[in-house]
Image: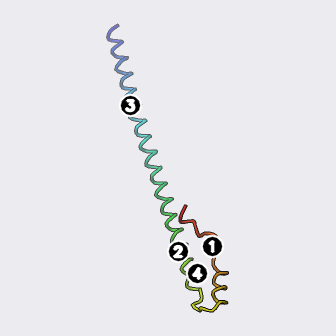
Amino acid sequence: MEQNKSGIGSIIGIVVIISIIILGGLYFWGKRIEESKLRESMASGEVQLKINEQNETATIRSLSSSNDLGSIEADLNATNFENMNTELK
């Protein structure tokens, strides 16, 4: 009878240890997937930022260098102020 109890106890111990190892592996696997998604989102955000910078540069280059009131007013009307605070978010 004692041999039977020690056999069951060791089997339960092995099952618990294997369960802990499996759960730890799943945890680290989930963290790795989360980090890769974060890297991808950061990379796509950097690409979008570069596109926005290129658009802004093109807009600035299209502005007039004249100092008369009509040119300044035309430049103000052509400027898009809607996305002005996106960098602050």
Q: Quadrant of the N terminus?
A: top left
Residues at circles 3 and 1 in contact by the CB criterion of under 8 Å: no
Residue highlighted by disc 4: 59
Contact, mark 4 vs mark 1 (Cβ under 8 Å): no
Residue that label 3 marks: 18
Q: Are marks 3 and 2 in contact (CB under 8 Å)?
A: no
In three-dimensional space, the C-alpha distance between marks 3 and 1, rounded to whole angstroms, equals: 59 Å
User: Which residue is identified by label 1?
Assistant: 81
Badge 4 or badge 1: first in the primary sequence:
4
Image point (43%, 35%), residue name:
23
Circles 2, 1 touching at the beta carbon (< 8 Å) = no
Amino acid type, mark 2: Glu
**Of pointers 2 and 4, the one earlier in the residue sequence:** 2
42 or 80: nearer the viewer: 80
Contact flag, marks 3 and 4 (Cβ < 8 Å):
no
Q: Could you tell which of marks 2 and 1 lies nearer the N-terminus?
A: 2
On the rendered image, what quadrant is the C terminus found in?
bottom right
Depicted 1 relative to depicted 82: above or below: above
Q: Secondary structure at mark 4?
A: helix
Mark earlier in primary sequence (3, 1): 3
The residue lying at 59 percent from left, 86 percent from top is 63
Q: Secondary structure at mark 2?
A: helix
Tell which of 45 and 87 is nearer to you. Answer: 87
Which sits earlier in the primary sequence, circle 3 or circle 2? 3
**Quadrant in which residue 18 is drawn:** top left
Residue that carries the numbered disc 2 in the rendered image:
53
